[in-house]
């Protein structure tokens, strides 16, 4: 009986921990008319940070890896152009490279908004059962008559303020032959990411799953 209780508690804790690890969710998404070959060769641009090249690299690598795992031929602009090339190249040169390179799709990742929010968590009072008399040797298994030897007490948790930071990101997929032809748009929000690597991995997983659900990627 005790082993079953421990197993149930372990499963419950694992589920809670797994749920709490994910801080990214999809806000909205849209898909237009999808050309059958749009994912044949896709280049991914991340325009998230001008000062930290590793953020661009992390996000592009995460998206590229997820797209490739679903059969798309994807490459990173960071790996193709280098960390500083995009900052110096004009849009005409980039467009020419995309056309000459035979790319069929272009994905652009941008930061739409960053918000800091403060929320007040009010105090709470909880009634708990407290064992009276000598402590049990084994708290998981004891005689049934011991269950009557309890009294009830109240535990109060004071109120406190919490601060969260949210990042709203957007991924746009374009037909490479027409820079104005967006064929997929997804917006996500990430709250209090632990680090750029985790945030990029969650973002990529969320967006690519939605692309699969909308039929842009192979099932």
Image: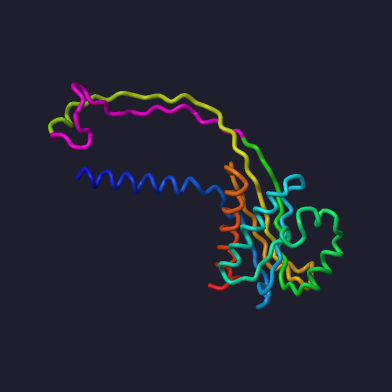
Which residue is more in the foreground, 5 or 69? 69
Most distant residue in the bottom direction: 36
Residue 167: give x, y in percent of width and height: 65, 46
User: Does residue 155 appear left or right of residue 203 in this picture?
Assistant: left
Q: Residue at x 72, y 46 (%)?
A: 52
In magenta stretch: residue 67: no
Left or right of 151 on screen, residue 77: right
Q: Nearer the viewer, residue 36 or 160?
A: 36
Q: Nearer the viewer, residue 177 or 182?
A: 177
Residues shaded magenta: 118-144
- At a point 56% along the width and 29% down the height, the residue shown is 161
Q: Please name the residue shown 59% across and 41% down the image.
A: 192
In the rendered image, the quadrant that contains the N terminus is top left
Instruction: Tell me: residue 219, above or below residue 189.
Output: below
**Picture layout, residue 101 above or below residue 136:** below
| Display coloring | rainbow
> How many labels sit on residues?
0
Q: Residue at x 55, y 47 (%)?
A: 23
* Residue 86 on image: x %, y %: 80, 57
Q: Position of residue 208 (x, y in %)?
A: 59, 62
Image position, residue 41 (x, y; %): 69, 72
Q: Height in image: 190 above or below 211? A: above
Nearer-the-camera pick, 23 or 56: 56
Q: Is residue 136 magenta?
A: yes
Q: Quadrant of residue 59?
A: bottom right
């Amino acid at each position: 009986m005790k082993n079953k209780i421990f197993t149930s508690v372990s499963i419950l804790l694992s589920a809670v921990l797994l749920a709490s690890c994910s801080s990214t969710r999809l806000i909205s998404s849209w898909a237009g008319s999808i050309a059958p070959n749009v994912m044949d060769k896709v280049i991914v641009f991340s325009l998230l940070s001008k000062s930290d090249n590793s953020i661009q690299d992390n996000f592009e690598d995460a998206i590229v890896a997820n797209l490739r795992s679903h059969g798309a031929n994807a490459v990173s602009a960071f790996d193709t152009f280098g960390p500083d090339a995009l900052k110096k190249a004009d849009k005409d040169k980039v467009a020419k490279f995309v056309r000459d390179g035979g790319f069929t799709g272009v994905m652009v990742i941008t930061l739409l908004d960053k918000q800091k929010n403060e929320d007040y968590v009010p105090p709470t009072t909880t009634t708990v059962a407290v064992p009276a008399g000598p402590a049990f040797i084994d708290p998981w298994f004891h005689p049934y008559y011991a269950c009557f030897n309890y009294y009830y007490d109240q535990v109060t948790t004071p109120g406190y303020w919490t601060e969260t930071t949210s990042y709203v990101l957007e991924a746009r997929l374009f037909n490479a032959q027409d820079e104005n032809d967006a064929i997929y748009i997804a917006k996500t929000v990430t709250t209090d990411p632990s680090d750029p690597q985790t945030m990029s991995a969650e973002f990529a997983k969320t967006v690519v799953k939605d692309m699969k659900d909308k039929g842009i990627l192979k099932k």
